[in-house]
Image (cartoon, rainbow, N blue to C red):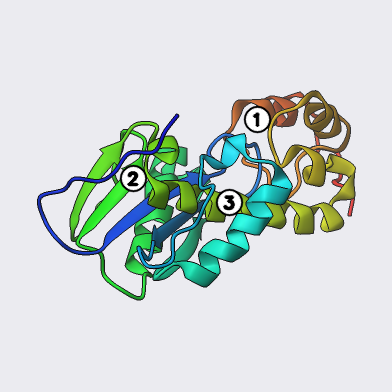
Amino acid sequence: MQQVALQWDSAGLIAGVDEAGRGPLAGPVVAAAVILDDLHPIAGLADSKVLTAARRDDLFDEIRAKALCFAVAQASVEEIESLNILQATLLAMRRAVLSLRLPPKLVLVDGNRLPVLPMRSEAVVKGDSLIAAISAASILAKVTRDRWCDEFDAQYPAYGFAQHKGYGTAQHLAALRQHGACPQHRKTFRPVSEVLMAAPAGGSPKAST
């Protein structure tokens, strides 16, 4: 899918926003906001999901080096549990935008829902494939969350976070049944709550450390 040129009626900086981690059973949801520099274009920007991990890592470094500014923020597991995943995602997006060093005139957000922001914003369905700044944000968010999973895997190796990145794979579900939930599992998500409900009286099995 070819990216489109922006034709907006107001001049000013444009930020792209995307998230990573809505679907997994564990860990924070991560959002990124990016304002690209037209004088330093970045070749090969695309939806992070269609890129290899090595290519994402390369672009992660290039985006950070060439963008006018960027910010990465998150909402914690506790916030996901108390707010729900949608509201926690929008909160992480708002935090990312408000953390930008330069205030954008317009914010383009991947998807069909918008965080509450003090500037004009537009939702763009499939924006991570269409808008370069959103593609860049998707890469920053995805790589940041994947690296969190790699680090968390070292603390809780029994679950395989480095492989499945928190998603509900057969490997992850089997580990949940065997070891119970660890502190970073989203206990309101059905696969996790079902494991906890099925655990013997006295609590779920002890998580490996």
Counting residues from the start of the chain, the first of labels 1 and 2 encountered is 2
Q: Residue at x 19, y 45 (%)?
A: 7
Which of the labelled discs sits on residue 28, or is there none?
3
Q: Is residue 200 visible?
A: no
Query: Would you identify the image quadrant in which residue 168 lies?
Result: top right
Q: Which residue is drawn at 72% across and 31% down?
A: 196
Question: Comparing marks 3 and 1, which lies closer to the viewer?
Answer: 3
Q: Can residue 131 be seen in this view?
A: yes
Q: Mark 1 points at which residue?
A: 193
Question: Comparing marks 1 and 2, which lies closer to the viewer?
Answer: 2
Which of the labelled discs sits on residue 205, or is there none?
none
Q: Disc 3 vs disc 2: Cβ atoms closer than 8 Å? A: no
SS at mark 2? strand
Looking at the figure, which quarter contains the N terminus? top left
Q: Disc 1 vs disc 2: Cβ atoms closer than 8 Å? A: no
Lateral position of residue 6 relative to residue 27, left or right: left
Q: Position of residue 138 (x, y in %)?
A: 50, 47
Lateral position of residue 152 relative to residue 58, left or right: right
Q: Name the residue under label 2.
A: 109
Q: Mark 3 Cα within 10 Å, few/some/many (few <14, many 20+)?
A: many
Q: Which amino acid does label 1 sit on?
A: Ser
